[in-house]
Image: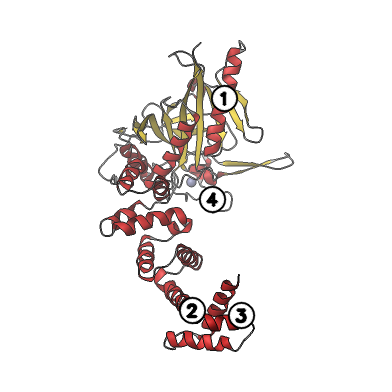
């Protein structure tokens, strides 16, 4: 008996971080404003309000399409997707149906290539929050009209892990292209999976799973559906094409509704928006996608984990720039992205300054971590912070030296002869030619003598 084969296609929605919304001038700022403050007649869908196309959003989608080697539609075409929901004030969503901006395209991850069917631009809905006692719900339209890119893949995934990795890679791509932070926790990126099983080349009945709130859940939901569908089929049941939701608490999918077909949405051309010719000229396409970044970093001899950290933390530009002048420093930089998470929060200038000063001062990793922490929390430059660490490092070295050279006095001090402490302070002061701060010398010396005790 042949094995059940899993087939998955992904649908991913991502909010584009444009300055304004998709069809009006309201701020695209759903996370930092009081409810229903970034709204206007277009957002509310009031009669007579006319939408305008956001050029920045179209450019972002073209940038994405070109980066993944897709075809770009020669003009924009919009359609109304009709359905009722309280978070959708117009009663329809402006989307793209027959002519998506991005046609095809492919993404390669470590030698595996996955294909897109298309990607299109649309608008997000508002956000509902339900009261804990279930007596009422509130709606915030700040999110209504935020540009949304929907990506639909071919059914190219045959393991849950591959689907998860693809979603993670997409997030890296969005960040590399600077079109979205694609934070799943904030709902900026939302994944849905179309899952089926079959023993033949003919695909089985597909079930769509929504409400997947994290990459981990992508994998769990697919694995659960795989088992559920096989069990149903082997028990003689017929699967229905339906939409299910992932319940992470129960660890299972539950039926939401039987699948609507596109006819249910009564798509028709949006009469208020013109067709506008797209242009590829103004769209920057020099970005290096994560997969190519990984290949280039591997050529430098970086370890796989280090490469992952560099790509995830947007450190590729720094490492490659350093590689041109000082390969060892480039490798050190890569390791810092892995070892010290906050290193990525410094800008490139400060990262370079820190690496140079580290080389001069011979700071160990712990000291570097301390400096990074201070620079990030206090918002100061590395140049400003470094001097105090430079001195401390010098001082602790001198103190160690003095202790090593005066073992007899150290023994006496430890036996209770307190007065010897002053002698040791004097030795350190002499070694620094009187430049050290005497209180720091005392502290450093006490610390060092305490350490040798243990
Ligand atoms: Zn508006
Ligand atoms: Mn959609």
**Residue 31, which numbered label?**
4
Local crowd size for mark 2, using a 10 Å CA cut-off: few (<14), some (14–19), many (≥20):
many
Whether residue 46 appears in this view of the structure is: no
Decide which of tag 2 and tag 1 comes sooner along the chain: 1
Using the rendered view, name the quadrant where residue 389 is placed: bottom left
Mark 3: give few (<14), some (14-19) or many (20+) Cα within 10 Å. Answer: some
Q: Earlier in the sequence, mark 2 or mark 4?
A: 4
Tell me: is circle 1 under 8 Å from ligand 2. no
> Residue 225, labelled with which disc?
1
Q: Nearer the viewer, residue 53 or 223?
A: 223
Q: Which residue is mark 2?
A: 399
Q: Position of residue 34 (x, y in %)?
A: 58, 53
The correct choice, above or below, for 410 with respect to 176 in the image is below
Residue 5 placement, left or right of 291:
right
Quadrant assignment for the C terminus: bottom right
Q: Nearer the viewer, residue 274 or 129?
A: 129
Q: Residues within 10 Å of mark 1 (few under 14, many from 20)?
A: many
**Residue denoted by label 3:** 414
Q: Name the residue rendered at 54%, 75% in the picture.
A: 448
Kindly state the secondary structure of the residue where label 3 is placed: helix
Q: Residue at x 36, y 49 (%)?
A: 302
- Marks 3 and 4: which is nearer the front? 3
The residue positioned farthest toward the front in the image shown: 408
Structural distance between the alpha carbons of marks 1 and 3: 69 Å
Q: Earlier in the sequence, mark 1 or mark 3?
A: 1
Q: Name the mark nearer the viewer: 2 or 3.
A: 3
């Amino acid at each position: 008996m042949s094995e059940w084969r899993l087939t998955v296609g992904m649908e991913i929605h991502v909010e584009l971080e444009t300055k304004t919304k998709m069809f009006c001038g309201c701020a695209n700022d759903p996370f930092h404003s009081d409810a229903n403050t970034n709204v206007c007649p277009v957002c509310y869908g009031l009669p007579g309000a006319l939408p305008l196309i956001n050029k920045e959003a179209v450019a972002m989608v073209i940038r994405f399409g070109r980066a993944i080697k897709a075809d770009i539609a020669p003009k924009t075409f919009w359609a109304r997707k009709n359905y009722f929901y309280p978070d959708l004030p117009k009663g329809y969503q402006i989307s793209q149906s027959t002519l998506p901006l991005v046609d095809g395209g492919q993404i390669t991850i470590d030698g595996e290539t996955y294909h897109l069917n298309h990607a299109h631009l649309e608008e997000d809905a508002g956000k509902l929050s339900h009261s804990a006692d279930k007596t009422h719900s509130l709606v915030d339209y700040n999110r209504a009209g935020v540009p949304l890119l929907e990506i639909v893949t071919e059914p190219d995934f045959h393991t849950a892990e591959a689907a998860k990795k693809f979603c993670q890679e997409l997030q890296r791509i969005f960040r590399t292209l600077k079109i979205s932070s694609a934070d799943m926790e904030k709902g900026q990126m939302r994944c849905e999976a179309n899952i089926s099983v079959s023993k033949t080349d003919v695909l089985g009945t597909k079930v769509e799973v929504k409400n997947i709130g994290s990459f981990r859940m992508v994998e769990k939901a697919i694995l659960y559906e795989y088992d559920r569908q096989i069990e149903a089929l082997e028990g003689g049941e017929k699967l229905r094409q339906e939409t299910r939701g992932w319940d992470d608490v129960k660890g299972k999918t539950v039926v939401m509704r039987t699948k609507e077909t596109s006819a249910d949405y009564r798509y028709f051309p949006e009469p208020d928006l013109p067709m506008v010719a797209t242009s590829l000229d103004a769209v920057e396409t020099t970005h290096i996608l994560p997969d190519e970044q990984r290949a280039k970093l591997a050529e430098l001899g970086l370890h796989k984990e280090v490469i992952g950290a560099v790509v995830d933390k947007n450190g590729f530009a720094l490492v490659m720039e350093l590689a041109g002048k000082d390969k060892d420093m480039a490798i050190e930089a890569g390791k810092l992205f892995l070892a010290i998470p906050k290193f990525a929060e410094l800008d490139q200038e400060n990262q370079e300054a820190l690496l140079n000063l580290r080389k001069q001062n011979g700071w160990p990793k712990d000291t570097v971590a301390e400096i990074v922490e201070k620079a990030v929390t206090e918002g100061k430059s590395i140049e400003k912070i470094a001097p105090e660490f430079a001195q401390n490092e010098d001082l602790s070295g001198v103190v160690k030296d003095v202790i090593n050279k005066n073992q007899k006095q150290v023994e006496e001090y430890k036996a209770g002869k307190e007065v010897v402490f002053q002698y040791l302070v004097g030795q350190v002061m002499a070694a620094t030619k009187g430049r050290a701060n005497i209180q720091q010398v005392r502290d450093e010396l006490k610390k060092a003598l305490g350490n040798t005790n243990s």
